[in-house]
Amino acid sequence: MKIVRIKSGDDIVYGVADAEGVLVYNGSPFVAWEPTEVVLPWSNVNLLSPVIPTKVMCVGRNYEDHASEVGAEVPEEPVIFMKPATSVVGPHANVIHPKISHEVHHEAELAVVVSKPARHVKAEDASQYIFGYTAGNDVTARDLQRRDGQWTRGKGFDTFCPLGPAIETELDPLERLAVICRVNGEVRQAGFTSDMVFGVAEIFEYITAFTTLLPGDVILTGTPSGVGKVEPGDFMEVEVDGIGVLGNPVVSPS
């Protein structure tokens, strides 16, 4: 089932998507919801980020080929950092290229969406706390990341965390799912979730050992090799098997 968050007119609602449009639901899938009889055609809706997380937890260097391309060792345990909730935008939303960076990179990733409060969750129980999966783009000001020696500023700009287009509730992360990034139609990244150093369940256990994940929180699971620069005027697309395509233009600050 593909769950979307949409704006139609002045209303922001959740719904279930298919080829024809969106079946509107009342309420939130993270609390309580029920279907209405309203089906909105795609021409009448705007896709939003499928969740508004309290936090986005991220895993660095979780693909060996990406660790190699940035000149880093493969970590012995997950490398965790955070992106603020204010970095989150949805499909087709502008990603703003900050004036103070000269090296903004795309990073295509599988994103995990949390279903209920999670603390001290064992890997074998992680699936009970996962609502579904979406696509994410861990946009990064690489020059600032290197300069700062830590990742908060380089990863945390407003608009630096596109998510979407939908939450797929029936995805199996243990399958060999393709994770692809295209810029202006050209493939830049093409990897598989099966190549992750640390799997979703292992990451979930590691994170919940030190912090509580809340409903709607997101985990970005790392990016394959091929990261590279984007400039204002470029159009980024992140595609994950079974989820769909997340597209965002890069623009100059106003």
Image (cartoon, rainbow, N blue to C red):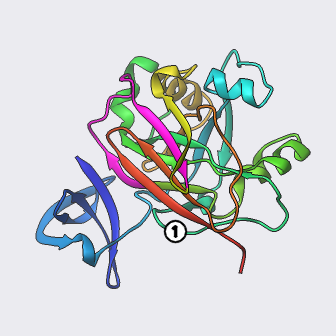
Q: Which residue is drawn at 55% across and 21% down?
A: 198
Residue 78 visible (yes or no):
no
Q: Is 234 or 243 nearer to us in this picture?
A: 234
Question: Is 72 rendered above or below residue 38?
Answer: above
Q: In this view, does 106 lie to the left or right of 51?
A: right
Q: Residue at x 45, y 20 (%)?
A: 123
Q: Is residue 61 left or right of residue 249?
A: right
Q: Residue at x 54, y 23 (%)?
A: 196
Question: Is 169 rendered above or below residue 8?
Answer: above
Q: Residue at x 19, y 72 (%)?
A: 41
Q: In this view, does 222 lie to the left or right of 179?
A: right
Residue type at numbered disc 1: Ala
Residue 236: x %, y % from top left: 55, 56
Question: Is 8 rendered above or below residue 186?
Answer: below
Identify the residue under disc 1: 93
Q: Give the range drawn in magenta.
A: 164-183
Task: Please identify the quadrant where the C terminus is shown.
Answer: bottom right
Residue lying furthest left: 37
Residue 72 location, quadrant? top right
